[in-house]
Amino acid sequence: QVLYEQEGVFIHSSCGKNDDQDNLIAGVLRVIEKENEVVVDWRPLDETLDTSNILCAGKDSSSVVEWTQTPKEKCSRGADRPSSYEAEWDMVTTVSFKRKPHSNGDATTHANRESKWSFLFSLTDLKSIKQNKEGMGWSYLVFCLKDDVKLPALHFHHGDSKSLIKCLEKHVALNESPHDERVLLVKTQKSLSQSFENLFDEPSYGLLQKWKKDPYVVTMGKFSKVTNYIVGTLRSSDQSNQRRPPSEMADFFNDTIPGLKINQQEEPGFEVITRIDLGKQPEVSRREPVSAEEWAKNMDSEGRILDVDYIKRLIFKGGLCHTLRKEAWKFLLGYFPWNSTKEERANLQKRKTDEYFRMKLQWKSVSEEQEKRNSRLRDYRSLIEKDVNRTDRTNKFYEGEDNPGLILLHDILMTYCMYDFDLGYVQGMSDLLSPVLYVMENEVDAFWCFVSYMDQMHQNFEEQMQGMKTQLIQLSHLLRLLDSGFCSYLESQDSGYLYFCFRWLLIRFKREFSFQDILRLWEVMWTELPCQNFHLLLCCAILESEKQQIMDKHYGFNEILKHINELSMKIDVEYILCKAEAISMQMMNCKELPQTVSEILGIENSSVTPDSDTGEDESGAELSCPTSLYQSISTPVIAANGTRDSAQQAAETQSLAPA
């Protein structure tokens, strides 16, 4: 449906140089509503124009303008793309305003010069409108999109720009800027939530420009759909210059996440920091999961945990048997205080139950009429309903239609919007809740455990991306210390920013491991042992495990993305936990550990020496020395190669009471 149409809207392609009519491109401006989306479209009047340069948006509501190929080009490229792929978490077609390179030769036609200005964008991507009056009597408008792309000024030679503004105000809220009365600002909802909303069923050829606009959406997608066409957006079309310089790549990603300062070396062989010998990686083994008997032995008659550090060490080394998770996760996540009695916990649950249902009643009691006037709640509900219907549906707890698990998942996420309305719901949060609800099998307990988990993960989902920025920088420091040569190789392939780890960090490996393995991985990480940011060492362990193949096969940018994505559901959780722990021991035992790395891991250089193995330092040296993890744990183990040690397998735990 055409909501607005106006001819005589011009682009001045050489504005300010002269008044030659050839520099004025006449066009038609339309506002169109299609499939619950409103788009603004401008294109030249000349119907014979070559459409290969027309800017258009992808299907999803978060898309921005992009240069697309002609239908012929799309068909020819289609054969190179995968024929089928997972429906969930797909890549999205969205790129920033960028012109295709075109010939400077005399053969360039007037039509082609005009057609390059055509554009189309969704109102969901509009950031502001600048309006002005010129001395010649007509007005002009400049649209600025959310990635700070400014589209060409549209000059209304026949007037009627006010009608356009009135039309747009029916679909977006426009407020005058306090700093410039000529600028109308779009009052938006949480842009991050919106960007997640239409993450499914989209093509993938806009990856890198989409990354620049919204790295959350791109990295949650399926990297297996990366094709050579994507690299074309990153590399010059000139075959003699196939790789953009690292400095240019640095600018590209610094624009994406301001403050993301990860060094890009000028030459692959150049080392920025002095190489530090971490020594050989020690052999690490794991024990059996903590049993119900072991847990009970560490609890007094009133239900207090006798030795918190000891039980955490047991969980770190072996995880929990499933029957214990429902109780132990409440402690690990901070819902239950470690020093609380059974009676105190029962009273806490009563209070939290009342509090939960008061919040649930808030959104349950909103009428349809009220919700029509509350766009944020309406948007949250819409996104939650979409995500709930595609979260872990292969798990028996959530499979089938009208599943009670799905109803609980929906209700908890809606109630969380009442708990933290500023953050509300962002795509990815359902992935964090699903295992928690699966374990708790109780709406109230699952909610408060989820709240505690979100307290840890909150910065990951904030619009400023501070949490993600910090973690990527920290991961870069750790990986460079661990293997500077591998870092250099990644940088030589435009991959030094480790953006392929974004999804790992955002939802804590939820989509990289099987459901049961995630239960094990998360409970180990929640012990906060053996150091701070252990999840970053897990990233290092995975990357180090894949280093040989990546380097031996000379994987480039495209192949690295594809390879990392295809690791999903193929990683051995016990092996990676062993390897990550071994890396932590390497770093903790290093006498020359860089201060930056010490701060990331939360250890002190003075206490980290190879012979610090007593584990008795009251000041906290116990966590600084990984050997303390094994002092009182004599149990069956699983070695780093994933097999049970035969001698230790025969020796069952004799006494695991607190020391």
Image (cartoon, grey):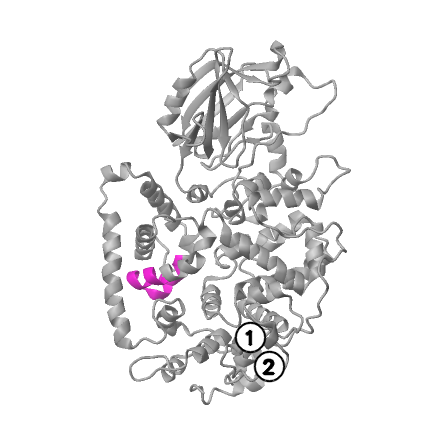
Q: Work out whether residue 633 or residue 142 is closer to the camera in this orientation and state it.
A: 142
The span picked out in magenta is: 433-449
Q: Distance between the residues labelled 2 and 1?
A: 9 Å
Instruction: Give the prevailing secondary structure in the magenta stretch.
Output: helix
Magenta span has 99?
Answer: no
Identity of the amino acid at label 2?
A: Ser
Q: In this picture, is 294 found above or below 14?
A: below
Identity of the amino acid at label 1?
A: Ser
Picture quarter containing residue 108? top right
- Would you say 20 lies left or right of 335 here? right
**Going 60% across and 74% down the picture, which residue do you hit?**
640
- Residue identified by numbered label 1: 624
- Residue identified by numbered label 2: 612
Q: Which residue lies furthest to the front in this view?
A: 179
Of pointers 2 and 1, the one earlier in the residue sequence: 2
Q: Where is residue 192 in the image (x, y as percent from the top left)?
A: 45, 44
